[in-house]
Image: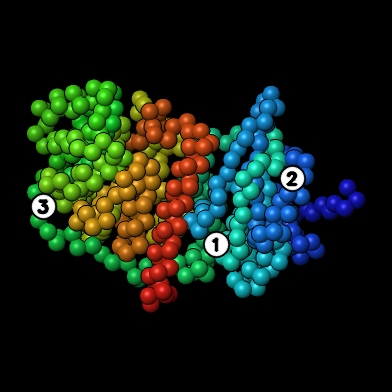
Amino acid sequence: MDRCRVLVANPLTSKETLEHVLAETQTKYLLVLPGARQISLEPNGLLRMLDVAESTKAGMVYSDFYEADKEEKKILHPLNDYQTGSVRDDFNFGSTMLFSTEAIRKAFEKYGGIPQVQYAGIYALRLKVSIEHQVHHLQEPLYTMAGEDNSTDAGKHFAYVDPRNQSVQKEMELVFTDYLRKIEAYLPASTLRKANNESQPFSTEASIIIPAKNRKGTISDAVKSAFSQETDFPFNVIVVDNHSTDGTTAVLSGLATQYPALKLVIPVRTELGIGGCWNEAIYSEACGRYVVQLDSDDLYGGTDTLQKIVDMLREGNYAMVIGSYTIVNFNLEVIPPGLIDHSEWTYDNGHNNALRINGLGAPRAFSTSLMRKTGFMNVSYGEDYAAALRISREYRIGRIYESLYLCRRWEGNTDAALSVEEANRNDVFKDKIRTDEILARQEINNRGFRP
């Protein structure tokens, strides 16, 4: 302990504490342990990280780790490689981050130091270092993390929209927006356009789109919720039945006899994801001028949801409108965190901050003519996020902050009870979406729209 120094300071995430630590650091590398859980390094684990840092000249190195369960059995926890789009403030680096002090000082000299923050200091440090230095992932477990992670999956998933985290998120947005400016991926709101939603004729004004596969127990509720909508315009409901095998098709056939405006689509292709099913709907002749999302296990919150969404699309000439939703269980009872309204969105910077967060909300509605130009990615995860980022690159997005939608959380959800490997795969995919979008926005600035 003779070589240890104890600092009484603000949290490690604050500007004051990090600058104090950096001022006192006289070594080539700085090992930051941002988590609250106890860790124990594997034999030569730190030497391995130092060796790789030296050989790669990386600005930061992190590694996989073991988690110790209640019986102290080690369970491998792999992490993802870092890429340009790995810009979420909650990207999982584990509990060890080895920084090159030279890389930190060069980054600060060129891009400025840590802003006046309490919570986003490590985030700012990582982003600035990553601009010109590699963030290197060692795909081997070099330490064990003890204790349990007491945060719930729902708590982690919705942390960025929890009102209790508002001050944290404002700092994260401030840091991230500065980073976008530094890498020339920031787009000022003045460059965004309104949509021309009257450019071509449509057979009806709006279509509610419901992709479905093996939803026998919930599809009837969804369809009836769609047809409960009271509007001053004609609309239909397009259900894309993606080759269900559980009786969903029969349920839909019965509903079609009750509702003449129910359009059933069974794709010829058998390899479609949710995005591919959306494409089947938006390119069909039955599709309306506007398309509005309804998942096959969810419900609209009232009979006026569709009217409110279309009114905003029309009045604001928006390319996309996103509402707010309430989390409920299968029996439609409200469960934490309740209302998800994405109040962090601002019309001045929401299109930039969207690159930092993992989703933009629901229900989502689009101008059909615009979506026909790009289509959706043929995947079953992230297709909506990719579409929203693509739209927000050029067009204004409208927001409704009252609850319009009941989102069921139950064991049938596509993201329920994911393994570490499955969650990693989803995160890598969204990071890749962000990577492509950042490159596209940099290209816009390179063509002469630099702020």
Q: Residue drawn at (31%, 34%), measured in percent from left and top?
A: 298
Where residue 51 sits: x, y (%)?
Answer: 73, 54
- Camera-nearest residue between 446 and 259: 446
In the image, taking residue 137 as reference, residue 188 lies left or right, namely left
Up-down relation of residue 114 to residue 293 (above or below) = below
Whether 394 is drawn above or below 68: the answer is: below
Callout 1 crowding tier (Cα within 10 Å): few <14, some 14–19, many ≥20: many
Residue 22 coordinates in the image, percent (x, y): 74, 62
Which residue is pictured at 77% across the width and 45% down the height? 44
Of residues 66 and 321, the one nearer the viewer is 66
Query: The residue tagged with tag 3: helix, strand or loop?
Result: loop
Q: Position of residue 8 (x, y in %)?
A: 78, 53
For the residues marked 2 and 3, what is the alpha-carbon distance in whole angstroms?
63 Å
Answer yes or no: do the residues labelled 2 and 3 have beta carbons within 8 Å? no
Quickly name the residue at label 1. 175
Query: Mark 3 or 1 closer to N-term?
Result: 1
> Distance between the Cα atoms at labels 3 and 1?
44 Å
Q: Image point 72% across, 39% down: which residue? A: 38
Q: Which residue is mark 2?
A: 45
Q: Is residue 324 visible to us here?
A: no
- Residue 354 is at least partly visible in this image: yes
User: Residue lying furthest front in this view?
Assistant: 55
Residue at the disc numbered 3: 202
Question: Which one is in front in this view, the residue at disc 1 or the one at disc 2?
Answer: 2
Q: Is residue 439 left or right of residue 268?
A: right
Check disc 2 and give the amino acid type.
Gly
Single out the mark in the foreground, 3 or 1: 3
Left or right: residue 362 versus residue 52 is left
- Which mark sits nearer the N-terminus, 1 or 2? 2
Q: Name the element at disc 1.
A: helix
